[in-house]
Amino acid sequence: MTENRRNKIVVVNMVGQVNRLITAFTVPYGAEYVKKFCDIVRHDWEKTVYGTGLPKPNPSVESSTVKFLYTPVLYKQAEYAELPYKKGTYTVVDAFACSGSRFYMDSLQVFVEVCKSDMGDRRIWANVYYVSDSVIPAIVIHAEEIEFVHDYPGDSKVEEA
């Protein structure tokens, strides 16, 4: 195995109401990166955003300490009181509330659930719901693994005739 094939790039991006590339990092083949993904999603890049029901400074708070007063989120909050929470073919490994502006959305309160698939290795994503519409995610943040072919010549090489 060559040196270039021992690592892969993991790209973390979000799609939905907002489409953005969040970050990328390298990991060795076979390595778990659940904690790194959770840290990236919880990263407090807007520590000065405050609002009704949000702590100071804003970032994430445990879902059990936020009173949403909206029934669908209350159900999720009760389910995720003890994490990890097994839900069908995936497991919710983290859940928290914060301002939507942390994900370049409207600055309303959002509920985030970080999920890991039980059906495949290293499949992890986060569903971000507005508290007022907590049935369909406003955005989904996911990690995509990218591998490079070692002998890729690049587009700049021209074949000689």
Image: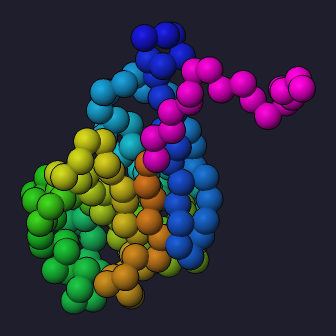
Quarter holding the N terminus is top left
Residue 148 magenta:
yes
Q: Observer-nearest residue: 8 or 129?
A: 8
What residue do we see at 27% from left, 57% from top? 115
Q: Residue 147 lies in magenta, yes or no?
A: yes
Q: Which residues are magenta?
A: 144-161
Q: Quadrant of the C terminus?
A: top right
Is residue 81 in view from this perspective?
no
- The residue sitting at 65% across, 26% down in the picture is 152
Q: Main secondary structure of the magenta part?
A: loop
In the rendered image, the vertical position of residue 10 relative to residue 99, given as above or below: above
Out of 25 and 60, give the one closest to the viewer.
Answer: 25
Q: Which residue is at the far top?
A: 2
Evaluate whether residue 38 shows in this view: yes
**Percent x, y of residue 20:** 62, 59
Q: Can you give x and y, in whole percent of width and height, for residue 43 in the image?
A: 47, 47
Image quadrant where residue 28 sits: top left
Please name the colour scheme applied to the rendered image: rainbow
Q: Is residue 56 above or below residue 109?
A: above
The residue located at (50%, 33%) in the rendering is 147
The location of residue 87, given as percent across then percent down, is 13, 65
Judged left or right of residue 13, residue 27 is left
Q: Is residue 98 left or right of residue 69?
A: right
Residue visible at 12% across and 72% down in the picture = 78
Q: Nearer the viewer, residue 69 or 110?
A: 110
Q: Quadrant of residue 70?
A: bottom left
Q: Is residue 60 above or below residue 53?
A: above
Residue 4 spot, x, y in % from top left: 54, 16
Outermost residue, front side: 161
